[in-house]
Every structure is written in structure tokens, then in C-alpha cells.
Image (cartoon, grey):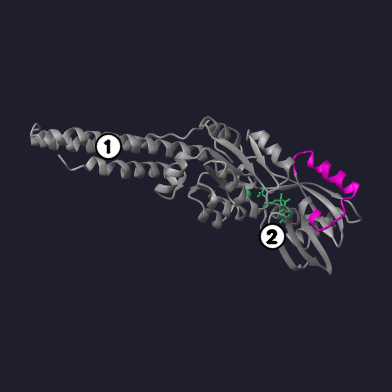
Amino acid sequence: MACPCALGLATPTALMVGIGRGAQLGILIKGQDALEASGTIDTVVLDKTGTVTTGDMRITTITALGSMTRTEILRMAASLETGSEHAIAAAIVKAGRKDSLPLDDVTDFTALPGLGARGTIDGSSIIVGSPRLFTEQGFPATASLQAAIADHTRAGETVVLLGRGGTVEAVISVADTIKPSAGPAIRYLKDLGLTTILLTGDGEQAARRVADEVGIEKVLAGVLPAEKAAAIKTLQDAGKRVAMVGDGINDAAALATANLGLAMVHGTDIAMRSADIILVRDDLHVIGDAVSLSRQTLRTIRSNLLWAFGYNVAAIPLAAAGLLNPLIAAAAMSLSSVLVVSNSLRLRNFETRHETSTSDE
Ligand code: ADP
Ligand code: MG
């Protein structure tokens, strides 16, 4: 009677079944700590590009400010961006390739994380990146430049500039596509009582548009890669238990800082290594599923423990007092283990919430 098997089984069986069910649903939970963390978070911070959006960007407009033609602008930008890994760089390179533009040699290439890239082509120093980068580099903010930027930003698209020497030659808009699952997946998070925040290096306006469209409450825009982890820390200092969802190199530190890091599987290796949970399905419902499944697993563990503990507390004195027939005691003991195991197995029935039952992307 006094063998507390059920007590010993209470936690590992629930964890095993919970983590196993997660894996079936495309949620790879790296162990018990990750599961416990996801059962207790109250705030979800989402990276914009590649997480809420597909990150498959395309150029929408190119406005020349000087004497360069569209082809010259694209050729120069594509030549420089060949060395970058950013989604915007990929869009520019793809557009150049589509027009079969020859690429020029770039020397002194430097990637400026969260800002853009710089290099030398034909003896001129070339720079591509955010308006913020250009301000920092001391480019004059002329009225015509500001008007062009405002014009491009109006559509909520991401704006990058091309500079040659000391002058801004072009304004380029890049559009991204919001994942079809994003809206309903954010609603799911809200239904679970979680606060949602969009965190991005992109400008305020582009970030706002995405947040409004999918129903994310708060926006933290213009955050440099190095500042992303600090933004998470600030939330934690305010008493929040924070989950961070991201995919990029620039998200890795934030993923590691958060109470719970979730990485999209198509993301960079470093993001996946920094995360506690890897989301294999490219459908944002997995975030809510991960939280919900973890909560349910923790509840199962608690009810298992309560049951197993209560059972032993009640039965051991009876057995000690000789009031229990050893046969019945043995049967009851096995029964308690069976009950705990079957309670854990109920987690197998955990279902993903799919409002949009059609596949995503
Ligand atoms: P996100 O948080 O959305 O992933 P990043 O922090 O990577 O964004 O980048 C922030 C901004 O920096 C971009 O919106 C863009 O304006 C600029 N940027 C970064 N890298 C590049 C690049 N290679 N080419 C052009 N612009 C870039
Ligand atoms: Mg990203």
C-alpha cells in the first residue's frame, strides 16, 4: 500500500503526454522548464517581419530624387544588397534579377544590423537602409526627401533609401504580406487573457498598420536588434511574464531573455537555438496552442498530484491500522496509478483551435 507509485507517475506522465501532443501539433517543447514557463506567461511579444508577416517582401515603388534612372537605382541597390541577409535585401536582389540587371562589384561591404548596409561601388560610397540610418549618417533631410518619404509611408509600407556619396538618390517602398492566420491567432491569444505587443525595427507607421490589421494592442517600433532584449527586460521589470516569438538573428537575444522564447522553424538557426519552443507549423495558432496545452498539462500535473497524494494519505493509515485487506490494497494501489496515467493520457485529446480551417500559406 505504501508504495506511492501514483505520486511518482503524476508529473512525468503528464509531461510526456503533453510534450508528445505538442510535437504532433507542430510545437517542439524543449523540456519541462519550457512547458512550465509557457503555462504561466501573461504577455506575448511578436516580431513583425517573418513572424506576423511572411517576410517575403517585394518592391512596390521606386522614386528617383536625382538624375539616376530606375534601372540604375535598382542595379546599384541590388549589387550592394547581394551581401545582406535581410528580407528587404532579398526583395531588392530579386527585383534586380527579374530585370536581368548585371551586378557591380562591391568593396568594403558592411551590414548595419537593423539599419541597412553600406559599401563602395566604382569608387562611390553607397548606402541602403532606413530613413533613421540616413539621419544618423548626417544626410540632409531636405523638404523634397521628407515629402517623398511621407508619400511612400502613407501606404504603411516599409521605406528604405539609397544614398550615393552624400546625396539621397532614391526612395524605395517594400511591401510585406501579413500571414492569413495572424488575425485569428491574435484573437486566440486575447481569449487566453494574454496581452499582445508587436516589436520591430521597422518604422512606427508600417508597424501600426500591421498591428491594427491583426489586432495587436501595443507597438514597439524602431527598436534596433541590440535593443530588443532590453525591451523584453523592461516588460519583465514591470512584472510581466513575457513570451517572445521571432525568427531572425536580430531576435535571438530577445528570445533568450524572455521567460519563454518561441522560434518559427523557417527562421535562422540562432533563433531556434535561443528558443525554448520551436513552432514547426507556419500557422500562428501554434502560439495559443502552446500556451493552452502547457496550461492544461500543468493543471493535469496538479490534479494528478492531488489525487495521488490524497489517495496515499487516506489509504496508508487504513492499511497501517490493518483495516485494509492486502488484496484490496494492492488492487487499489494499481488503480490509483491507472487513474493517474489515464488522466495524463487525456492530454492526447488536446485540440488545436482553428477558426480558419483552411491551410495557411
Ligand atoms: P524587423 O524587426 O522588422 O525584423 P530589422 O530590425 O531587421 O526589422 O530592420 C529594421 C529596419 O532597418 C528595416 O525596416 C529597414 O528599414 C532597415 N534595414 C535593415 N537591414 C536592411 C537592409 N539590408 N537593407 C535595407 N534596409 C535595411
Ligand atoms: Mg523577423
Residue hosting label 1: 340
Q: Is mark 1 within 8 Å of ligand 2?
A: no
Q: In this view, does 31 lie to the left or right of 204?
A: left
Give the image location of residue 307, x and y in percent.
27, 34
Q: In this view, does 231 lie to the left or right of 193?
A: right
Is residue 356 in sight in this rendering? Answer: no
Q: Is mark 2 within 8 Å of ligand 1?
A: yes
Give the image location of residue 259, x and y in percent.
50, 46
140 magenta-colored? yes
- Whole-Å distance between the Cαs marked 1 and 2? 54 Å
Q: In this view, does 72 lie to the left or right of 231?
A: right
Q: What type is the residue that disc 2 sits on? A: Ser
Label 2: element kind = loop
Q: Give the range drawn in magenta.
A: 135-157
192 magenta-colored? no
Label 1: element kind = helix
Residue hosting label 2: 84
Picture quarter with the N terminus: top left
Q: Is residue 22 left or right of residue 312?
A: right
Residue density around tag 1, few if under 14, some if 14–19, many if 20 or more, within 10 Å: many
Give the image location of residue 224, x and y in percent.
68, 52
Q: What type is the residue that disc 1 sits on? A: Val
Give the image location of residue 26, x and y in percent.
47, 44
Which residue corresponds to the image point at 79% horizontal and 56% vertical from the top-left? 136
Which residue corresponds to the image point at 15% horizontal and 35% vertical from the top-left? 317
Foreground of the two, 86 or 61 = 86
Disc 1 vs disc 2: which is toward the camera? 1
Q: Earlier in the sequence, mark 1 or mark 2?
A: 2
Foreground of the two, 30 or 36 = 36
